[in-house]
Amino acid sequence: MSSLPPALVFLLGAAVLPLLPRRLRSGAFLLFPLLALVLIANLDVGATITVPVLNYELVPLQVDRLSLIFGYVFAISALVGGIYGLHVKNTGEQVAALLYAGSALGVVFAGDLLTLFIFWEIMMVGSSWIIWSRHTRTSGQAGMRYFMVHLVGGLLLLAGILLHQQGTGSLSIELFKGGAASYLIIAGFALNAAVPPLHAWLPDAYPEASPTGSVFLSVFTTKVAVYALIRCYAGFEPLIWVGVAMAIYGVVFAILQNDIRRLLSYSIISQVGYMVAAVGIGTELSLNSASAHAFTHILYKALLFMGAGAVLHVTGRSKLTELGGLARSMPLVLVLYGIGALSVSGFPLFSGFVSKSMVVSAAGISNMEAVVLLLYLVSIGTFLSVGLKLTYFTWFGPARSLEPPRAPTGMYVGMALAAGLCIAIGVYPSLLYNILPFAVDYQPYTAANIAGTLQILILTGLGFWLLAHRLGGRDTITLDVDWFYRRLPTLAYGLASRLQIVSRWRQLWDLYPRMPTIAYQHLLSRFDRPYRKMLPHLTDYSRDIALGALFVAVFLTIVVVLSAL
Amino acid sequence: MKRILIAIVTVLVLFVLVDFLWRDRSNHYRWSDIPAFYALFGVIGCVAIVLVSRLLAHHCLERDAGYYDRKSDDE
């Protein structure tokens, strides 16, 4: 088979799917990840495709071992997510998912910065569209905030790429070393990797998507960014401490959450912290460990989101304060979720163990003992939040006399597939180690590593037993940096109107935000079926658009000023 | 309940012994010679994370669930 960019399969799928009969769509969805998987399996290391466009050579396909491992896991998780969503009758969400998965593969196989950027932006559109596809007021607003924040991230990246091109005349993807261009590009990457303080979009938006939608969201954006960081910033030392800080930040916030999918979202930030730290260390072992952890993390985190999504799907609830006692009615979901929880917590024989210990060892071998200890601390918090708190207060704890119906079979099959992979990798780590970018000389199953890890985990379990009363769900939210664009403008406006500064601006304030939605509605009316029905109907989000646009304008000005300097 | 607890503690002691007897020669840390270090670390870490996160929540992060839905005037 000749080499083709795997992204094409998905993009083609996104165009074709709405034309198929409605009943066939969710089944046909599976064809595209399957086809892409076959395509990726047949790609040879070193294969490239170049397309001359104007003065540049675009490279939509460039294959090496690093792009292959991310390619595999993306295609696999798109397949798993598709099976999980077999019951879904939401064409918009399915098309968005194909677009999203395809563009993630596009980034991973991109051979030049411009191609990378184009797919990066398609990814933003696909992921926002997934969030909007839940068609609720909160998902619409969260999606709009998500879109605006990523617009800023994309602009940072674009500014960096253009500046880099101006300076060096090259668009090739390489290790960047210092300079304004390099910092702009890493800011764009860091935003997608959800590095605090550029992370608030993730726990804001992921829990608002549909159950299937959030499974897709949990897979791609952050891990594509990790891929880009490995590619362009391996060994960039500040990333070590950024990653460690991120891992701690995520886990502290995860423990405080009441919404189960928001808890899992903070846990993504925490786990991506391991990868970012590993990228910063920059040895072959650490880059291997970053890729390995991305691979295992995608699978177990998708599994966790599937479990939480199944609970939401059948009970209509996602707050720990409203859940409890589901072990009797949903035992199988509990078991499958439990496999994901044991994986993320790094129990021996589960996938997280073989990649997480690799990250920790990479830090240890590079003599970073503080990093080692802090990452152990994070693994305590991970087990506490994802493994114990969420599990206990959803499936055990005070029963709420819920009598949920059975979840769709596809959901179980999707979860079982992911769970099977988590155990397979945990038991036979060489399955994963053989496809890592560099040759592996690492053994996770040493007596000392197993004994040390289990000591920590057992005592965390006992600690939870003693402290459970402090960890119970509370019907609250926690503030995060999204406060600055969700609350501050409202407060400022309130203050301004109290001081009567604003009265003359009021008319403009009231009209201006409506303009984009009016324009959008107009545009929407020009689309024919079946496309019209699957586009998001943005009617009620005008204020968010207005604030977002303001936000973008401010950032754009800063970027322009910076690049002019 | 008591039996489970006894079983867990037994397993724990076993792991502490394993850890002490088969020390990892490839990754030697400053704390590798302290017996039951990881067990101690687990206890202290667990309590620290729970207390610190609860303190943070209590003093600055926690708001009621409808916080972002309110108009500015309600403050």
Image: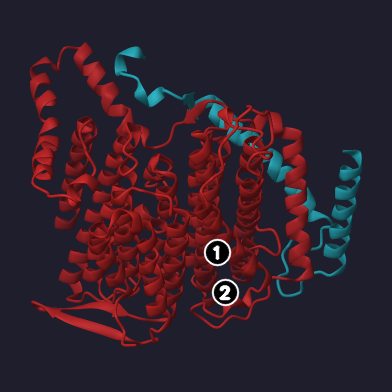
Bin the neighbour count of mark 2 within 10 Å (Cα to Cα): few under 14, some 14-19, many 20 and up: some
The tag on residue A432 is: 2
Mark 2 lies on a secondary structure that is helix
Disc with the residue nearer the chain's start (1 vs 2) = 1
Residue depicted at 47% across the width and 65% down the height: A280
Q: Marks 1 and 2, how far apart in space?
A: 9 Å
Vertical relation: A359 (above or below) A375: below
Q: Nearer the viewer, residue A158 or B70?
A: B70
Residue depicted at 66% across the width and 74% down the height: A428
Q: Which chain is cyan?
A: B
Q: Nearer the viewer, residue A33 or B9?
A: A33
Vertical relation: A452 (above or below) A52: above
> Tags 1 and 2 in contact by the CB under 8 Å rule?
yes
Residue A180 in sight: no
Q: Is residue A156 left or right of residue A207?
A: left
How many circles with numbers are drawn on the protein?
2
Q: Quick one: quadrant of the C terminus of chain B?
A: top left
Q: Quick one: quadrant of the N terminus of chain B?
A: top right
Quarter occupied by residue A362: bottom right
List x then y, in percent, for residue A496: 21, 18
Residue A126 in sight: yes
| Residue with the mark numbered 1 | A296
Vertical relation: A314 (above or below) A359: above
Residue depicted at 64% across the width and 47% down the height: A334
Chain A on-screen colour: red
Kind of residue sitting beneath label 1: Thr
Q: Nearer the viewer, residue A425 or A486?
A: A425
Q: Is residue A289 left or right of residue A455?
A: left
Q: Is residue A284 left or right of residue B51?
A: left
